[in-house]
Every structure is written in C-alpha cells, then in structure tokens.
Image (tube, grey):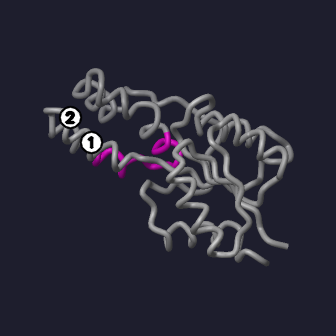
Amino acid sequence: MKRRVLVIDDEEAIRGYLSTILSESGYDVVEAVDGEDGLSKAREMRPDLITLDVMMPKKTGVFVLGELRRDGELANVPVIMLTSVKSFIEQSYKELDNVDAIKQMETLLDEPASKMQKFFLRFKSFRKMLLIDREAMIEQFRKGELTLGGMPSLPDIFLDKPVEPEEFAHAVNKLIGQPSE
C-alpha cells in the first residue's frame, strides 16, 4: 500500500511543488489549503506524514502541530514543518536600515542549544526583534534575560523554504521510508 502524505500550505504554488515531488517519488498525496482544512483532512485520512507551513490563515502551523500532538490517533504522525526564516531575513535587509541588528539575529538562529529554543527564537521572538525594539531585545537575549516561552510540541524536522527537491525527498524518506515499504 502506498504511503500517504498530507501537504498543508496556504500557498497554491508551494502545495503543487511539494505534491509533485512526492507524487513523482511514489507517495499518495492529499493537499490542504490552510490549518483548519489540514486538521480536518488529517483526522479523516490518517496520513503517514504531514508537511506543515508555519504561517497560514485560520489556524497557524504552530496551532495545528499542537492539535496533532494532542490527538491520540495523530500524535505520532511525523511532521515536517516548513519555515521562511531565510527569506524573511533577506527581505529584512531590503526594508530595515539596521544591518547590524539583522546580522546579530542571523547569528542567534545558530546559537540556541536546543531545538525548542531555536523554534521559539524563530517563531515567537524573531519578528518582535525586527519590528519592535531590536537592539534591546537582542541584548536581553544575550544576557539570558529574555524568556522565549515554552511549547509542548515540536515537528520532527524543520525545512526552510524554498526547499530543494532532493532535500525534501530525503527528509520524507528518513521519516517514513520508501513509498511502498
């Protein structure tokens, strides 16, 4: 029996791109247009793997991931979470005048010791650092005074958009094996 993958992303082009890679690799693919649709389809189809965008309308990827991990039948389904941190940083260079602060934030992405800290640095505090009081928040983080919050749920793998086809296929195979195993 073919392994089934649920692709949850609000961008039609990304859904199509990932679905094509998966289909050509031999997986059965179902697409969802947002977090709400994704949760519904996940509960209905019980996929072998889910790819999940972080920023979506209705229900964010972070919310969906938490719901999946709390659902007894879906809690162990592997999740690949897709982010746009690199492109967000690239855009920040174009829009913001404080290049030093952005460079420091790039460094921070590689510094947190745990996957959980990295997750929250990226998705909770990152935008605040860029949009509010960047220098003060960076200094607080470096001094250990900035708390990043906690979350009980983490994806199995983070991939940054745009993802290379080989990298994506490798991540899927790593988590659930070949399409017909």
Q: Is residue 76 left or right of residue 86?
A: right
Q: Amino acid at mark 2?
A: Glu
Q: Secondary structure at mark 1?
A: helix
Q: Residue furthest top?
A: 132
Q: Main secondary structure of the magenta part?
A: helix
- Give residue 181's position: percent from left, percent from top: 79, 78
Q: Secondary structure at mark 2?
A: helix
How far apart in space, not on screen, are marks 2 and 1 (Cα)?
6 Å
Q: Residue at x 29, y 30 (%)?
A: 130
| Closer to us: 62 or 106 | 62
Q: Is residue 116 left or right of residue 128?
A: right
Residue 117's disc is none
Q: Residues within 10 Å of mark 1 (few under 14, many from 20)?
A: few
The residue tagged 2 is 95
The residue tagged 1 is 91
- Range covered by the magenta-colored residues: 106-119
| Closer to us: 142 or 176 | 176
- Give residue 85's position: percent from left, percent from top: 39, 46
